[in-house]
Image (cartoon, rainbow, N blue to C red):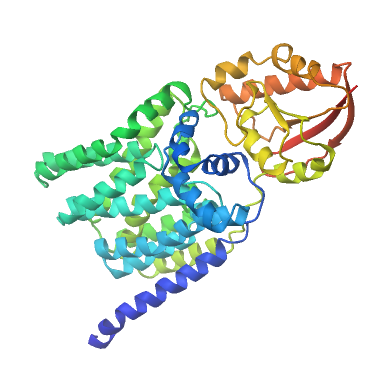
């Protein structure tokens, strides 16, 4: 027994290294695919001068930390798809040792290994490790914040109060849903305080320091809430709360995880108090986000990245107690995760743009009836073309100006924006119109409905214009989402 204990650090280090290597193999199959809408926006914003990025985000809806990190990353590693997604991959791989540390400190080495395995194989993290967005960083920070909360206020390790402040501040500067997690942690802390399980001073000091750290960004958040928000989002139904675990751990793996939890709890109740607090944080965060999205829709499945940290640690603690059928079920989960295929190409913008790029030149007009598509188009089309959307001529094609976007989109009729732009073009100039192709399910958000109206109107106006001659259409392929159609015209 003593010999095994002496070898335990080496065994854990070996297991960690193996998990990182296996995860890297699992998460590199789609690094070089074409960008979809949000990735084009990420790279476009990060390509601004470092000092200009916070100001540019006043037109967007996100905090600045990820974009600042991406800016520095691109300076070193370049701006190819694989290069920019490499930053997300790094955060996803860092989540593995973070989960092992958190699980081990809170619940023991078995839970640490299982938490690390969950971070290494989670289909959600596999998907977003291969996307130029902030979600793998959100997962990493949510793991660290959840662990520090439990260590500080459940295990009584006061030094983690300061660390919790660090993780929460970084999380708030990474994604706005950090506000919901901070509020949920505050509610759980109040519950512990009412039961006299924690003192008052640490929690109050933490709240004040986190608030002061976030204060410089607060005016931007308030402006974003009033003028940018998320007009593309739908008001979520209660059902979306129930499918969060499947989105994080895999819908096919979820029944096996339920079996593992059932037999583990049956074998060794009750559940650790820290587990109940972590589950409370996750539920509180999700419910607060859902309630706020009933007032002003701002819900997207990918935002549930912030819930993976507390749920992963709680799940690891529970199944670490199991044997027999729990082990069998976990082996099945690992098998499902291992055969999880790389995400399909998220966009055909690169394919379409590559096909049409030889036919357009600087000074030609590119029309996009979906304004947020412009940064991705700008990535793949020749430099020097002029972009027009129903919101008007695009001043900076690297980003989308969401300020009062829905009002501007609804006002952007063909007669007021498109036809005058066509009339200003000299004979011989070309116009490329790029329009979204509807998927199987049509979004009912106000933004999506307005885009569909503008798309029908603007395509019909170009087809009927006596000044234009159609000279080609680029066929689209049945991609999973973000499919576009391109039509080329020449001014007579």
From the viewer's side, name the closer residue of 89 and 157: 89
Query: In x, y percent, where is residue 429?
Result: 84, 27
The reply, left or right, for residue 196 in relation to residue 85 is left
Q: Which residue, as the protein is rendered here, is positioned at the far top? A: 415
Please tell me how many numbered marks the rendered image carries: 0
Is residue 243 at all visible to an observer of this figure?
Answer: no
In the image, is residue 390 above or below residue 345? above
The reply, left or right, for residue 184 in relation to residue 237 is left
Q: Residue at x 63, y 33 (%)?
A: 397
Query: In x, y percent, where is residue 328?
Result: 45, 68
From the viewer's side, name the closer residue of 311 and 373: 373
Query: In x, y percent, where is residue 153?
Result: 18, 50
Q: Residue at x 28, y 44 (%)?
A: 280
Q: Residue 95, located in which quarter of the rendered image?
A: bottom left
In the image, is residue 287 above or below residue 271? above
Q: Quarter of the image containing the C terminus?
A: top right
In the image, is residue 101 above or below residue 218? below
Q: Quarter of the image containing the N terminus?
A: bottom left
From the viewer's side, name the closer residue of 410 and 77: 77
Q: Which residue, as the protein is rendered here, is positioned at the far bottom? A: 3
Is residue 20 at all visible to an observer of this figure?
Answer: yes
Q: Residue at x 16, y 57 (%)?
A: 157
From the viewer's side, name the closer residue of 252 and 27: 27
Query: In x, y percent, where is residue 486?
Result: 78, 34
The reply, left or right, for residue 219 in relation to residue 481 is left
């Amino acid at each position: 027994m003593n010999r095994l204990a002496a070898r335990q650090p080496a065994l854990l280090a070996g297991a960690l290294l193996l998990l990182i290597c296996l995860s890297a193999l699992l998460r590199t199959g789609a690094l070089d695919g074409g960008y979809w809408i949000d990735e084009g926006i990420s790279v476009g914003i990060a390509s601004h001068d470092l000092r200009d990025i916070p100001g540019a985000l006043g037109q967007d809806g996100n905090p600045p930390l990820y974009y600042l990190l991406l800016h520095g990353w691109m300076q070193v590693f370049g701006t190819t798809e694989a290069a920019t997604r490499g930053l997300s991959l790094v955060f996803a791989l860092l989540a593995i040792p973070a989960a092992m540390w958190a699980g081990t400190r809170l619940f023991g080495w078995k839970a640490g290994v299982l938490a690390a395995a969950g971070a290494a194989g989670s289909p959600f993290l596999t998907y977003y490790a291969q996307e130029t967005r902030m979600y793998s960083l959100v997962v990493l920070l949510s793991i660290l914040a959840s662990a520090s909360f439990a260590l500080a206020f459940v295990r009584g390790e006061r030094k983690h109060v300061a660390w919790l402040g660090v993780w929460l501040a970084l999380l708030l500067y990474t994604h706005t849903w950090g506000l919901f997690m901070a509020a949920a942690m505050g509610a759980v802390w109040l519950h512990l305080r009412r039961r006299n399980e924690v003192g008052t001073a640490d929690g109050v000091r933490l709240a004040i320091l986190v608030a002061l750290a976030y204060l410089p960004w607060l005016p931007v958040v308030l402006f974003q809430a009033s003028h940018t928000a998320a007009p593309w989002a739908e008001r979520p139904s209660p059902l979306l709360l129930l499918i969060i675990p499947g989105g994080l751990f895999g819908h096919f793996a979820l029944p096996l995880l339920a079996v593992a939890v059932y037999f583990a709890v049956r074998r060794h109740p009750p559940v650790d108090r820290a587990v109940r607090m972590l589950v409370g944080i996750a539920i509180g965060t999700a419910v607060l986000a859902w309630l706020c999205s009933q007032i002003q829709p701002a819900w997207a499945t990918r935002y549930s990245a912030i819930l993976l940290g507390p749920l992963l640690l709680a799940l690891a603690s529970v199944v670490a107690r199991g044997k027999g059928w729990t082990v069998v079920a976990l082996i099945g989960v690992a098998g499902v995760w291992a055969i999880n295929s790389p995400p399909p190409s998220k966009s055909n913008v690169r394919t379409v743009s590559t096909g049409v790029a030889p036919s357009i030149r600087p000074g030609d007009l590119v029309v996009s009836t979906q304004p947020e598509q412009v940064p991705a188009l700008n990535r793949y089309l020749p430099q020097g073309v002029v972009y027009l959307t129903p919101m008007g001529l695009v001043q900076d094609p690297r980003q989308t100006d969401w300020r009062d976007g829905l009002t501007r989109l609804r006002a952007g009729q063909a007669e007021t924006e498109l036809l005058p732009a066509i009339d200003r073009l000299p004979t011989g100039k070309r116009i490329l119109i790029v329009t979204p192709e509807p998927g199987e399910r049509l979004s009912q958000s106000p933004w999506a409905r307005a885009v569909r109206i503008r798309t029908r109107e603007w395509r019909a106006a170009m087809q009927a214009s006596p000044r234009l001659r159609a000279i080609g259409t680029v066929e689209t392929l049945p991609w999973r989402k973000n499919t576009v159609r391109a039509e080329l015209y020449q001014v007579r």
